[in-house]
Image (cartoon, rainbow, N blue to C red):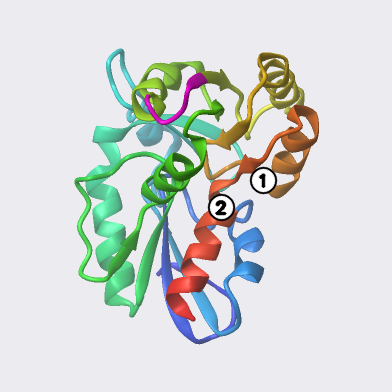
Amino acid sequence: MGVKVGAPGVKVGAITIGQSPRTDVVPEMLPLMGPGVEIVEAGALDGLSTGEIAALAPRPGDYVLVTRLRDGTSVQVAKHHIVARMQAQIDRVVGEGARVVALLCTGEFPELTCPRLLVEPQLVLHHATAALAGGRKLGVLVPAPEQVEQAVARWNGLAADLRLEPASPYGEVERIREAARSLRDWGADLVVLDCIGFTVDMKEEVRDIVGAPVILPRTLLARTLAELLS
């Protein structure tokens, strides 16, 4: 059974690539989604042991994903190991009555299918940024150095100039501050925090340091869902 959060009403499936519940994410999203929304959470790594999760670690050349476990620790997994597990969780929450399904990850998952509306944060984030970044200097924070190359391929071409900085939302906050200072000194006009793990507090701190607007995936996702459900 998935973890249910919020008042009984319209069901929204929330699929994390890690373990549910995402107590670091969902509580910040719920107030933005309006009344009468019940989130049914499920995770691709739910039910797996430490050893089983370790076996999903990326190897050179893999698409790297960074996520959070139930105990608050972060792990890296290879995308190809968990797509089928994500699909199974999507199917399950739809079977439990989810009217809309949202991914709690900014990775790219074109392989996934859903008979209900599937909201992929990466697509929403990418198109929103594309609408704003033309002719500007775009700074992007990603959780791990291993993700920089794949992120450059994803974000390149949207802005006049692009700079990537690795800084994990699951690590030391000082590293996020360092990344923000680097983007400030570079002259970033717009910043994207490219991970669902970044919090509202982190967004505000990055905005204050850089002195530029910051796009936060979790709140963008929540407001998109609110629009769809209202």
Residue shown at 40% from the left, 46% from the top: 127
User: Mark 2 — residue?
Assistant: 218
Density class for disc 2 (Cα within 10 Å; few <14, some 14-19, many ≥20) is: many
With respect to residue 71, does 152 lie above or below? above
Observer able to see residue 22: no
Report the magenta residues as a range: 157-162
**Farthest front residue?**
135
Please say whether residue 170 is visible from this viewpoint.
yes
Among the two numbered marks 1 and 2 on one chain, the one whose residue lies closer to the N terminus: 1
Instruction: From the image, give the main secondary structure of the stretch colored magenta.
Output: loop
Residue at the (36%, 29%) spot, across then down:
154
For the residue labelled by badge 2, is the local secondary structure a helix, a strand or a loop? Answer: helix
The structure residue drawn at horizontal position 67% and vertical position 46%, both measured from the top left corner, is 199
Q: Which residue is mark 1?
A: 199
In this orientation, which residue lies closer to the viewer: 27 or 195?
195
Residue 182 within the segment the image draws in magenta? no
Residue 155 location in percent, x, y? 40, 29
* Residue at point 61%, 24% (across, down): 167
Mark 2 is on which residue type?
Arg
* Amino acid, disc 1: Thr
